[in-house]
Amino acid sequence: MAFSLRVFQPSLPGFRANTFIRYAEEAPFHTPVFVVTHEKRDPWERPGGTTFHFVNDGIEHALDQAREGAGDRDVRTAGGGATILKHLNAGLVDEFSITLSPVLFGAGTRLFDGVDASRVALEQVRSGPSSRVTYLTYAVHPR
């Protein structure tokens, strides 16, 4: 799994106070997690098999490490709109899912603003509604 630092930000000394996710004793992933950051940090091991590795030399290197750590399993990338856009435009995504909910935040990054449409084509492969959200899955193809 690869994360952007903004999604991760645990309550450790040196991290910003406005954290989004705080992991107690046991993180829920039970697999290596690679966090893209600008800072060099030592790995952070949690009980249950989750170790957070902090990668400060780009999304490609984080993804390479995540693929190596995953073996024959899927690699998932989590992050905000800017992180997903970087991965899409770099050609590093073959499929992505969106959980769409009609909540108005008033600000944020539009997911498809900034997609290089001359290089990326999207094909909807699945969709499914629930009472509160719509689930969308797209395959990503090069143009």
Image (cartoon, helix red, strand yellow):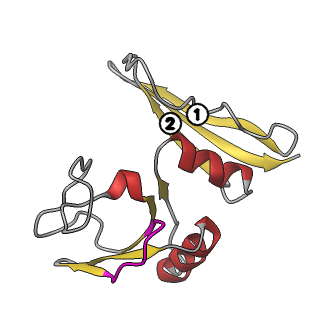
Was residue 62 drawn as part of the magenta stretch in this picture?
no
* Residue corresponding to mark 2: 98
Residue furthest left as drawn: 25
* Residue corresponding to mark 1: 111
| Extent of the magenta region | 35-43
Where does the image place residue 16, in percent across and percent down from the top left? 26, 55
Question: Mark 1 touching mark 2, by CB under 8 A?
Answer: yes
**Residue for point 24% across, 50% down:** 19
**Given this view, does label 1 or label 2 mark the residue nearer the observer?**
1
**Residue for point 19% across, 67% down:** 12
Dot placed on the residue nearer the N-terminal end, 1 or 2: 2
Query: Could you tell me what secondary structure mostly forms the magenta stretch?
Result: loop
Where does the image place residue 87, in percent across and percent down from the top left? 64, 54
Q: Amino acid at mark 2?
A: Ile
- Crowding near pointer 2: few (<14 within 10 Å), some, many (20+)? few
Give the distance between the C-alpha atoms of the residues marked 1 and 2, in whole angstroms: 10 Å
